[in-house]
Structures are given as C-alpha cells and as structure tokens.
C-alpha cells in the first residue's frame, strides 16, 4: 500500500525567493541607517570634553579647598591648559586619568595657561596676577566648538564668559 504525499508537507520546507529578497532589502536599509549614524564621528566630542573639563575643574578646586597647604604652587592644585592635556598639572605629567583628560582631535583656547586655585577655590594665573573671567573653548577638527566660563570667584558654567 502506498501512502499519499500531502502537498502541505512539501510546501513549508524553506523560504521563498521573495521572502529572502525582502529580508535582504530590510537588512540593507537598517545597515545603511546605522552606518550613517556613525559616519564622521570624531574621537572626542567638544561637548563631552566641555562636561569633563567642568568636572576636572571642580575636582581640582575641591582638592585645593580641602588641603591645608598654605602655598598653591603645588602641581596638584594647578589647572594646565596644554596642547595635549587638560587637567591638574601633576596629573598631566603622570597620566592620572581622574584629574586630567587627553585632547585627542581637539584644540583648546587659550593654550598654555596655568591656573592656580586659592583656599576658597578662586582661580588666579600661575604668574600671580588675577585671572578675571576665563573662557575656555574646545574645538574639533570639523569646526564644532564648545566653551565654558571660569569666572573670577571660581564658578564654572557652560558657555562663554560675558
């Protein structure tokens, strides 16, 4: 006796060509969207650097205000605005990532400043003169920039000083 083969068993053995083409087209659309989101992304965003810089400045200020040292020429309490590093002068030399950040792909203005903090957290230039308000600007190679303001009493805010 011969058993009859039902057509429903043979019909569900794989995908049809149309189903495969539709899936490939959908995957291509998703891949193109994902690739466009990551195209042109730089190593460091100026806005991320701005937020990190605010945190570093506050950390240096807090360390200075909690110290009992009478002099503020200690490199741990000096903010350095160098070409490759932004942060505590001592941390830029020792690669301490908690008090400094590397400026890969970013330029900083003003460059070369060293700012000291007194026991109240107020900034002054390492030369001993009053710093006044200082605008610190981070700029990417694509021309995107972000700035922050360090005013004469030590308050740090997003945006340029007025």
Image (cartoon, helix red, strand yellow):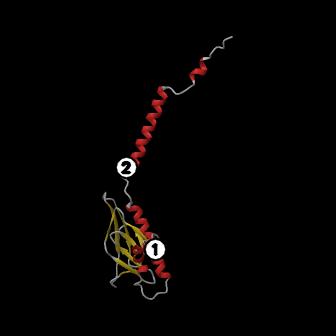
**Labelled disc at residue 110:** none
Picture coordinates of residue 84, whole percent (x, y): 35, 68
Q: Quadrant of residue 26?
A: top left
Q: Nearer the viewer, mark 2 or mark 1?
A: 2
- Work out whether mark 2 precedes mark 1 in sequence or the reverse, and give the earlier one: 2
Picture coordinates of residue 104, whole percent (x, y): 36, 63
Q: Quadrant of the N terminus?
A: top right
Label 1 Cα neighbours within 10 Å, binned few <14 / some 14-19 / many ≥20? some
Q: Quadrant of residue 106?
A: bottom left
Q: Which residue is mark 1?
A: 58
The correct choice, above or below, for 147 with respect to 7 in the image is: below
The residue that appears at 61% across and 21% down in the rendered structure is 9
Picture coordinates of residue 116, whole percent (x, y): 39, 80
Q: Quadrant of residue 118?
A: bottom left
In depth, the one of 4 and 126 nearer the eye is 4
**Labelled disc at residue 39:** 2
The residue that appears at 48% across and 81% down in the rendered structure is 65
In the shown orientation, is residue 8 left or right of residue 44? right
The correct choice, above or below, for 16 with respect to 118 in the image is: above
In the shown orientation, is residue 39 left or right of residue 6? left
Q: Quadrant of the C terminus?
A: bottom left
């Amino acid at each position: 006796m011969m058993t009859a083969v039902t057509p429903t068993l043979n019909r569900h053995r794989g995908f049809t060509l149309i189903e495969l083409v539709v899936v490939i087209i959908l995957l291509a659309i998703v891949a193109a969207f994902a690739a466009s989101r990551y195209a042109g992304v730089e190593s460091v965003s100026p806005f991320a650097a701005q937020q990190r810089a605010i945190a570093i400045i506050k950390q240096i200020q807090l360390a200075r205000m909690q110290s009992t040292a009478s002099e503020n020429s200690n490199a741990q309490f000096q903010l350095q605005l160098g070409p490759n590093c932004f942060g505590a002068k001592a941390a830029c030399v020792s690669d301490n990532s908690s008090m400094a950040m590397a400026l890969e792909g970013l330029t900083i203005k003003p460059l070369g400043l060293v700012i000291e903090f007194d026991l109240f957290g107020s900034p002054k230039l390492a030369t001993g003169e009053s710093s006044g308000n200082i605008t610190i600007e981070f700029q990417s190679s694509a021309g995107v920039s972000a700035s922050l303001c360090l005013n004469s009493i030590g308050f740090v805010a997003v945006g340029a000083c007025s």
